[in-house]
Image (spheres, rainbow, N blue to C red):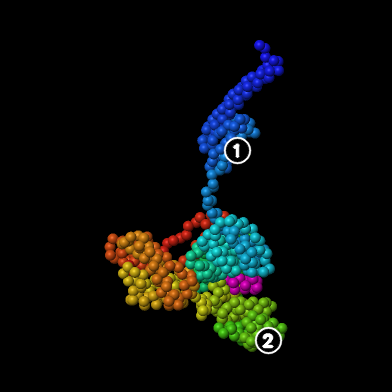
Amino acid sequence: MRLPYPIAVALIFAVSAGLSLIAASFSVSKIEDASEFAVRRVLNLQAHDWAEVESDGLRVVLTGTAPDEATRFNALTAAGTEVDTSRVIDEMEVAPTADLTPPRFSAEILRNDSGISIIGLVPASQDRDDLINRLQRLDQSAPVSDLMESADYAEPKGWDQAIDYAIKALSDLPRAKISASPGLVRITAIADSQQEKDTLEQNLSRAAPPGLRIGLSITAPRPVITPFTLRYLIDEEGGQFDACSAQSEEARDLIIASAREAGLTGPNSCTIGLGVPSPRWPNAAQLSIRALAEIGQGSVTMSDADVTLVAAQDTNPLLFDRIVGELENALPDVFVLHAVLPMPEPDDPAGPVEFSATLSPEGLVQLRGRVGDETLRDMTDSFARAAFGSAQVHTATRVVQDLPADWPVRVLAGLDALSHLHNGALTVTPDDVSLTGISHDPEAKAQIAGLLSDKLGDAQDFSLSITYVEPPAPEDALPDPEVCEEQIAEVQTSSKIAFEPGSATVATDSRDALNEIADILRECGPIRLEIQGHTDSQGREEMNQQLSQARAQSILNELRGRRVPTSSFSAVGYGETQPISDNGTEEGREENRRINFHLIKPEQTADTETGLEAMESETPDTDASDAGTEDQ
């Protein structure tokens, strides 16, 4: 029986749909398997075996945990090379990132005439407004530039200490660069003189906390010498310099060598500075000194490009003329020679033509002798009162006619030179300006020689006999830290610091030694001192370390009990790690059981690095010196 037409059509459609569904399902399975296989294969080839691949129809789902974000992205890109990227579903995760290493915090502070700037990386907890305000208080008129970056990490140990010290140091340094990092401060600065450099180094060292490393690079620039002066004299006792200037170490060595050949007997130092009139200055000085040596006695003065050769009064005129002629032809260009052969002085029944001034150690000045007119007398009196003090000057000069035309210049130049002395005497004659006395400035003789050479002019002679005497130390001046360290070492040499066996209690017979050391430290003021404890090697290393620390701390406490300011002291135990003798003998072990008082000195550094990390990477000098003793 035939099926009705509608039923037949419906049946055909149902069979066709079933067959289509079966074919489609088979095709999808094949595509899923092929896609999954291709993606898994490429991921394995690129070492992404951590990734899982799952097909879901036309979609390819990636799961798994990538070690980092870059690896996850690389896996996603690799899958996209095998199937269309729109079919790739990213459900991968990234492993949690381990804690990052904290950055190196550091700040560099620059100060000059243009203002103050601070640059670097600081902790986020740093109160930047307070830091800028503290820098601003150093100079209210100077702008402060904040160029800092911050990072949200814990503030490292020693950071506040370094910043506080850096700002304190900057208050005394108008031109400086200070690099501060945890536990380390490096200072680069310029001083106006060697004396100021020494003072700054001592003050900065004393002010530093004991646990802070400091590096100092303070330079004193070469002075500008005006006029550039050299003066060399030869008399019966030999040769000597009144003044010596050179533009370099090589020039100085050449000049000194020439003076030694000419019989140098006095000090042989030259001031190295700027302002040389010609690069051939040392050659001109060498020729002039040799010419004076051939003449025999006299003086040669070089003031910039002027060379004045003054022979002794009894010099042979023929010899003088020959040597002067040879020197004139040999001197380098620019230099001009003025040669003087003094004539015998005629007898003067009216007495010597001279002006004199004396300066007493108390600062009293007496003016005597001849002046040309009332105007010069008033001028001389006014000049002296301005230089020495109005109440300090007593004038007893007299007016005499027919004095040399350059008499006023010679008198005033001589008084100006006398004002550079602590005490002394000035004598002015038509042929000479003579100055004798005492100065507390080691450079006074050279400065006065330059002054007289400049003011008296060419072919003018003068003589200087100036003695340097070290100025008395101020009554409240603190002794040098090195001297304090030496004195403590002397006490420990004669009186050993001992402890009760196996304890940190100071032995009774060591009390006197501690009293002496306390007296020294009270006189020394705030020096940076590390009290070091050391033991022998008997017993466990850990116990020796603890015992040495306890003994060092015990000494620090004993000093505090004796009212010694110890804010700049630290106590450190080194255990058995730094023996100074053989632990195999009783004598050696006895020497190794000791207390050291070690002066913490700043590191002398050259300003060769500009990066703060390079500064921090340097290791401190940990050598100990000046060993004391203690009992274990």
Local packing at callout 1 (Cα closer than 10 Å; few below 14, some 14-19, many 20+) is some
**Residue 304, x across and y down, in percent:** 63, 66
SS category of the residue bearing label 1:
strand
Image-based side of 549 in relation to 215, left or right: left
Residue shown at 62% from the left, 60% from the top: 118
Q: Is residue 528 visible?
A: yes
- Please, which residue is most extreme toward the top here? 1
The picture quadrant where one finds residue 426 is bottom right
Range drawn in magenta: 445-457
Q: Foreground: 193 or 95?
A: 95
Please identify the quadrant where the C terminus is shown: bottom left
How far apart are labels 1 and 2 at the CA level? 112 Å
In the rendered image of this protein, does residue 565 appear above or below residue 367?
above
Local packing at callout 2 (Cα closer than 10 Å; few below 14, some 14-19, many 20+) is some
The amino acid beneath tag 1 is: Asp
Q: Foreground: 544 or 421?
A: 544
- Residue 399's label in the rendered image is 2
Q: Nearer the viewer, mark 1 or mark 2?
A: 1
Residue shown at 68% from the left, 16% from the top: 8
The picture quadrant where one finds residue 192 is bottom right
SS category of the residue bearing label 2:
strand
**Residue 627, x across and y down, in percent:** 38, 67
Residue that carries the numbered disc 1 in the rendered image: 90
